[in-house]
Amino acid sequence: MATHWRSVCIFTFLQLCTFTISRLEQVPTPPLPILPLPTYSQLKWQQRELIMFLHFGVNTFTDSEWGTGRESPAIFNPAGLDANQWVKTASDAGISLVILTAKHHDGFCLWPSKYTDHSVESSPWKSGHGDVVQELVTAAKTRDGIDVGLYLSPWDRHDRRYGQEVAYNQYYLAQLQELLSRYGSVREIWFDGSKGPNAPNMSYYFSDWFSMVRELQSSINIFSDAGPDVRWVGDEKGFAGSTSWSTINRSSLSIGNASIEGYLNTGDPQGTDWLPPECDVSIRNGWFWHKSESPKKLSKLLEIYYNSVGRNCVLLLNVPPNSTGLISKADVQRLRELRGAIDTIFSSNLADKCFIKVSSQRGGKGGGFGPENVLDNDHLWTYWAPKDGDKEEHWIEFRGRDKGLRFNVIRIQEAIGLGQRIKRHEIYVDGKRVAKGTTVGYKRLHRLEGGVVYGQIVRIRIKDSKGMPLISSIGLHFDPYWHPSG
Ligand SMILES: *[C@@H]1O[C@H](CO)[C@@H](O)[C@H](O)[C@H]1NC(C)=O
Ligand SMILES: *[C@@H]1O[C@H](CO)[C@@H](O)[C@H](O)[C@H]1NC(C)=O
Ligand SMILES: *[C@@H]1O[C@H](CO)[C@@H](O)[C@H](O)[C@H]1NC(C)=O
Ligand SMILES: *[C@@H]1O[C@H](CO)[C@@H](O)[C@H](O)[C@H]1NC(C)=O
């Protein structure tokens, strides 16, 4: 009996203990988000960083950029077309999404559309039994982790319905339904507002089109000047603004309006919509393949990378297949060099071996929001957070252990799953400022204008932010390709 009572006592005592402990040491929770937030599909898209555009069609055979719509389907004969080569090229470059021009302004369809005979069906390629969209989809399926996106040009210089508003919008919508219901999952659909100066004045029924896209594909991102999921960055150089917000007011946007390009380029800190920018640029001068053109230099592609991916953007890099139906050797080679360079620069992080200090940390030591989070592989959901309500300037500092640090690139990433916050930041090495910037977003890369720095202590100071800054990753890297002039 005595034993029994003793165990009851101990049991109750233990319960009391646990109760008290849990009251004293509640596990610190994540902070509240700052709206607007990305959707799940937008977050997945952002993490891709690099995606590929394939401009391919009758222009590939006529050495032109904008077809007239009067091309004979007889010229379309990519005898050696191998979509596996396209997909392998993308995959080797670390690219996980490939977007094909199913129809460009010339109106020629790369799939056998029921609604026109101006398509592969009328071409000699595979005796009219070919389907480029299907070839790409099949190739992507055999290579794990490659997704497909499509572009269907609204401007159509071939179809006679163009200019008759209702008839053409119906034709366009019918083709959109074919593309989004026949080929399985499509992850991005690309709409532009491009229209020649002499094109008939006609409205596109974008809201009908977008609604249909949503109805047919659940995890797709819709790209246009005005979103609704991904916005154009406002230029075709592949450069985001040095200030680059994923937020913007959709109500201020319209498709094909040149006067909003500056706004698209920087976004809006007060923006009520999450609409991140995509930077489209071609690896060559033109969008379509031309015998006379060759790919941009590696140094140029790296500059584009720093100014797009390094400015909170996804880079949509166009790599045009040639008239054989293959990506040219020179482009394959250049993409391999680009991937090699990116891996060389970012595979090692000097910050890994540093002592870290921060201005303050949410939930105290062991609370789950310490600076060690900026060195793990999770760039979204683990992060350093300062203490709530801390009015002092927020900073994080890296100190080299024995010898000095030698680097020329600084990488900062925000935990954008809780909103984009940082408005202004500066970086100091041994007390001397080496870089400053405004926004950070998913990824901000500073390639130091002054070249390589040597030093002991690197301090990143957050000068202004919406609420508490939440930093998910930081890197100190060495870029052997970077030789600033002067
Ligand atoms: C085009 O049509 C719209 C109405 O659909 C009209 O408001 C606009 O002024 C027209 N533009 C030109 C250049 O004719
Ligand atoms: C283009 O954008 C400007 C600036 O936001 C706006 O005033 C104008 O109405 C827009 N034009 C069209 C055709 O939407
Ligand atoms: C965007 O919308 C917000 C909220 O309505 C507003 O405060 C802000 O001024 C708008 N931005 C622009 C550039 O109009
Ligand atoms: C297209 O690229 C492939 C691969 O480099 C090459 O074998 C072929 O000759 C090229 N075709 C043309 C027309 O240049």
Image (tube, helix red, strand yellow):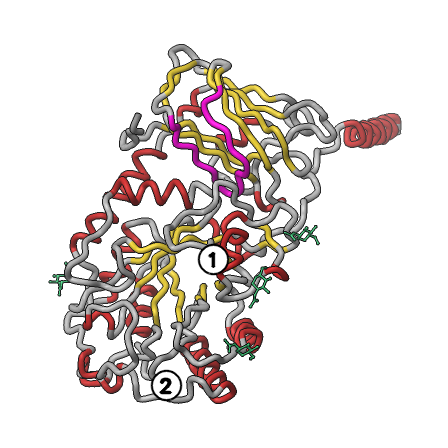
User: Looking at the image, do the residues carrying marks 1 and 2 touch, with CB atoms under 8 Å apart?
Assistant: no
Counting from the top left corner in percent of width and height, residue 168 is at 46, 85
Q: Position of residue 223 (x, y in %)?
A: 48, 63
Q: Residue at x 26, y 81 (%)?
A: 120
Q: Tag 2, which secondary structure?
A: loop
Measured along the vertical axis of the image, is residue 477 above or below residue 455? Answer: below
Residue 200 visible, this orientation: yes
Does residue 343 sit above or below 197 in this rendering?
above
* Residue on which the image places disc 1: 232
User: Which residue is drawn at the image coordinates 61% and 60% (left, top)?
Assistant: 252
Q: Earlier in the sequence, mark 1 or mark 2?
A: 2
- Residue 159 image label: 2
- Quadrant containing the N terminus in the rendered view: top right
| Mark 1 residue type | Trp
Front residue of 478/251: it is 251
Which quarter of the rendering shows the C terminus?
A: top left
Q: Check if residue 439 falls in the magenta segment.
A: yes
Is disc 1 placed on a helix, strand or loop?
Answer: strand
Q: What span is in magenta?
A: 433-449
Vertical arrangement, residue 206 with respect to residue 143, above or below: below
